[in-house]
Image (cartoon, rainbow, N blue to C red):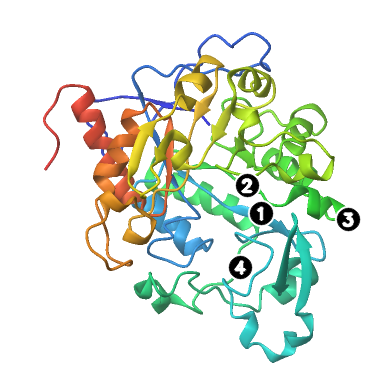
């Protein structure tokens, strides 16, 4: 994921952002890897689109994200029964589609164990693409995002190909390059059922002329083996991101009997190893700035500095505006759906030196980013 240079004192949402000239690669990294961090404008990533305002992972959510100023849109990838890459946060789709209300698919309900977790529901790998296209997307968090439920039933489940086409259309219409950061979900699980996705992802990027070191495309995963194989086996030349969590371990390592946890993989020596294969780490927000035991915001960790020292960028997830998702001291009330002090909170992460930020509300991410840049460059913040 390429950081962007600051072209002017204030970056408006419609400003065209040019790629930052790559810094000298860190020793041991793959060709083209290694980016500068000074004077760079953090990217705003539309997490699953503009998912604070539209049902996530719909073309409408991606379109709105770009219109609100997102630099990058994020589709999560799972597979259909017939091996087509479609866009859902999880392969279990009862919470994001109307499948539960469709009697013709009642017999598809199943119980499966995925990455060590037993789930009961309906799964994309049990549907052909034609069958999935008859379903309609629904808001995943209706209690918190009631306004988004207005759009329940309005949109279908998109394919990865359709989102790639949408990215091209939006880039042309808005006059600026919109990036895309697909996440390969549950790689080890899908490989175990004969539906691997890695080769298809690289093929799709090649077809859209996105598989090169300066590409606006970046591929991400919470697993490590597939990221290494994307680089060494499947010919990925675009950037890649190793996603991490504050607890647990990558599913591929667990399946292989490898005892390393996410925490183990974020030590300075492990980050230098990761930099041979990936360009970015994508931690949770509380891996950048910790939460105290009482739920208030705590102290900044060393992760950003350690990753930058290894030649890696840091793009954490996910800034959400509702009180439900904010540290206790950044909430505006006891109403979980009410927006809290999200702009102030974003400022904390930008000041920690991150290279980008996943957010469900790209418009607020852009405002927070621009305020940060104004203050950093010694200008008066925009009203």
| Neighbours of disc 1 within 10 Å: few (<14), some (14-19), many (20+) | many
In this rendered view, identify the residue nearer to me: 215 or 269: 269
For mark 3, give the secondary structure.
Answer: loop
In the rendered structure, are the residues bearing label 1 and label 4 in contact, judged by CB atoms less than 8 Å apart?
Answer: no
- Measure the C-alpha gap from mark 1 to mark 3: 16 Å
Instruction: Compare marks 2 and 1 and give the one earlier in the sequence.
Output: 1
Residue at the extreme bottom: 103
Q: Which residue is mark 3?
A: 194
Q: Residues within 10 Å of mark 2 (few under 14, many from 20)?
A: many
Q: Give the SS element for disc 4.
A: loop
> Closer to the camera: disc 3 or disc 4?
3
Which of discs 1 and 4 lies nearer the camera? The answer is 1
* 124 relative to 63, above or below: below
Residue 127 seen anywhere in this rendered image of the structure: no
Q: Disc 2 and disc 4: Cα gap in Å?
A: 16 Å
* Circle on res. 77: 1
Residue on which the image places disc 2: 183
Q: Which residue is mark 4?
A: 157
Quarter of the image with the C terminus is: top left
Q: Earlier in the sequence, mark 3 or mark 4?
A: 4
In the rendered image, the vertical position of residue 239 relative to residue 295, given as above or below: above
């Amino acid at each position: 994921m390429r950081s962007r240079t600051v072209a002017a004192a204030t970056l408006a949402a419609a400003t065209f952002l040019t790629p930052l000239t790559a810094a000298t690669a860190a020793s041991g990294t793959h060709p083209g890897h290694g980016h500068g961090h000074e004077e760079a404008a953090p990217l705003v990533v539309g997490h699953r689109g503009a998912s604070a305002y539209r049902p996530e992972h719909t073309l409408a959510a991606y379109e709105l994200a770009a219109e609100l100023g997102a630099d990058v849109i994020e589709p999560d990838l799972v597979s259909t029964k017939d091996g087509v890459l479609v866009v859902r946060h999880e392969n279990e789709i009862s919470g994001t589609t109307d499948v539960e209300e469709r009697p013709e698919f009642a017999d598809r309900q199943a119980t499966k164990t995925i990455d060590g977790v037993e789930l009961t529901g309906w799964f994309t790998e049990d549907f052909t693409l034609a069958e999935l296209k008859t379903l309609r997307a629904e808001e995943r968090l209706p209690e918190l995002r009631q306004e988004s439920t207005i759009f329940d039933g309005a949109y279908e489940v998109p394919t990865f190909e359709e989102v790639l086409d949408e990215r091209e259309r939006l880039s042309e219409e808005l006059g600026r390059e919109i990036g895309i950061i697909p996440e390969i979900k549950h790689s080890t699980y899908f490989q175990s059922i004969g539906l691997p996705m890695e080769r298809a992802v690289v093929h799709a990027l090649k077809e859209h002329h996105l598989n090169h070191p300066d590409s606006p495309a970046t591929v991400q995963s919470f697993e490590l083996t597939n990221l290494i194989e994307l680089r060494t086996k499947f010919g990925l030349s675009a950037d890649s991101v190793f996603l991490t969590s504050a607890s647990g371990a990558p599913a591929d390592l667990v399946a292989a009997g490898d005892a390393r946890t996410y925490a183990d993989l974020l030590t300075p020596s492990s980050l230098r190893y990761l930099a041979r294969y990936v360009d970015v780490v994508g931690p949770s927000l509380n891996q950048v700035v910790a939460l105290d035991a009482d739920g208030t915001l705590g102290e900044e960790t060393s992760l950003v500095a350690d990753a930058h020292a290894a030649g890696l960028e840091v793009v954490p997830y996910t800034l959400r505006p509702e009180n439900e998702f904010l540290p206790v001291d950044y909430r505006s009330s006891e109403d979980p759906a009410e927006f809290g002090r999200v702009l102030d909170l974003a400022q904390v992460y930008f000041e920690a030196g991150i290279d980008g930020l996943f957010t469900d509300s790209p418009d607020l991410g852009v405002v927070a980013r621009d305020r940060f840049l104004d203050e950093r460059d010694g200008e008066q913040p925009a009203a």
